[in-house]
Image: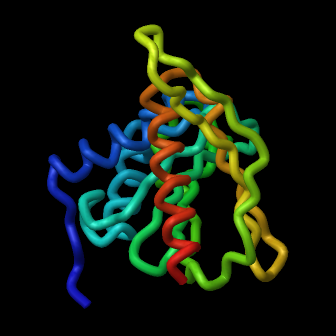
């Protein structure tokens, strides 16, 4: 296998999608580690966001000590996480990234655990912002929430991901 190197355009595209949910400063990682994270995401996605069916970035207010992204691509459900930096402030250490790619067939069910409806001022019908819990056959579960997001772009990213997830699960 040959080595792979992303383009600046690809890194910018991935960075914008990841940061749509919010900044990553709470992780205290150096800028180079963030760029490494974006590059690893691009590699895992097959080179670009254009090749995936849906992508969502975790709400950065999470206190888990990591920032996680999820994507759907064909019959797969993937995730990568960037771990928080625990060393001296400003230290330029490599990104600690881990994750997985699973078959959509491993999803036992998707539970709708909440939703909010946002009515437009001009009339019409509400926009739905869902919260779901994805249950896997082995007992693992992942929760993805739109209601906790602070701005419309991040809520739309979650809603689109959930819509594509439900379509993919229904097709299998």
Q: Quadrant of the C terminus?
A: bottom right
Which color scheme did the rendering employ for the protein? rainbow
Which corner quadrant of the image does residue 145 belong to? top right
102 or 60, nearer to the observer: 102
Q: How many marks?
A: 0
Residue 137: percent from left, percent from top: 77, 81
Q: Residue lying furthest top in this view? A: 121
Could you tell whether 161 is left or right of 53 in the image? right
Residue at 26% of width from left, 90% of height from top? 1
158 or 19, nearer to the observer: 158
Residue at 56% of width from left, 63% of height from top? 166
Which corner quadrant of the image does residue 79 belong to? bottom right
41 or 164, nearer to the observer: 164
Q: Is residue 69 above or below residue 28?
A: below
Q: Residue lying furthest right in this view? A: 139
Q: Is residue 29 above or below residue 107?
A: above
Residue 18: percent from left, percent from top: 43, 42
Q: Residue lying furthest front in this view? A: 124
Residue at 24% of width from left, 59% of height from top? 50
171 or 25, nearer to the observer: 171
Could you tell whether 50 is left or right of 147 in the image? left
Residue 72: percent from left, percent from top: 46, 66
Residue at 37% of width from left, 51% of height from top? 38
Q: Is residue 6 above or below residue 120?
A: below
Residue 148: percent from left, percent from top: 67, 29
């Amino acid at each position: 296998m040959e080595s792979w190197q992303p383009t600046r355009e690809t890194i910018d595209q991935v960075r914008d999608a990841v940061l749509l949910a919010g900044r990553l400063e709470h992780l205290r990682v150096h800028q180079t580690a963030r760029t490494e994270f974006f590059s690893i995401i691009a590699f895992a996605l097959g080179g670009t966001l254009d090749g995936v069916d849906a992508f969502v970035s975790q709400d950065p207010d999470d206190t888990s000590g990591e920032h996680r992204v999820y994507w759907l691509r064909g019959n797969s459900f993937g995730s990568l996480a960037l771990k928080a930096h625990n060393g001296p402030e400003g230290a330029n250490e490599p990104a600690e990234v881990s994750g997985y790619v699973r078959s959509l067939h491993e999803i036992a069910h998707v539970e709708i655990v909440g939703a909010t409806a946002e009515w437009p001022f001009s009339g019409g019908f509400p926009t739905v912002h869902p919260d779901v819990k994805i249950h896997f056959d082995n007992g693992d579960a992942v929760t993805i929430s739109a209601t906790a997001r602070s701005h419309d772009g991040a809520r739309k990213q979650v809603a689109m991901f959930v819509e594509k997830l439900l379509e993919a699960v229904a097709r299998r």
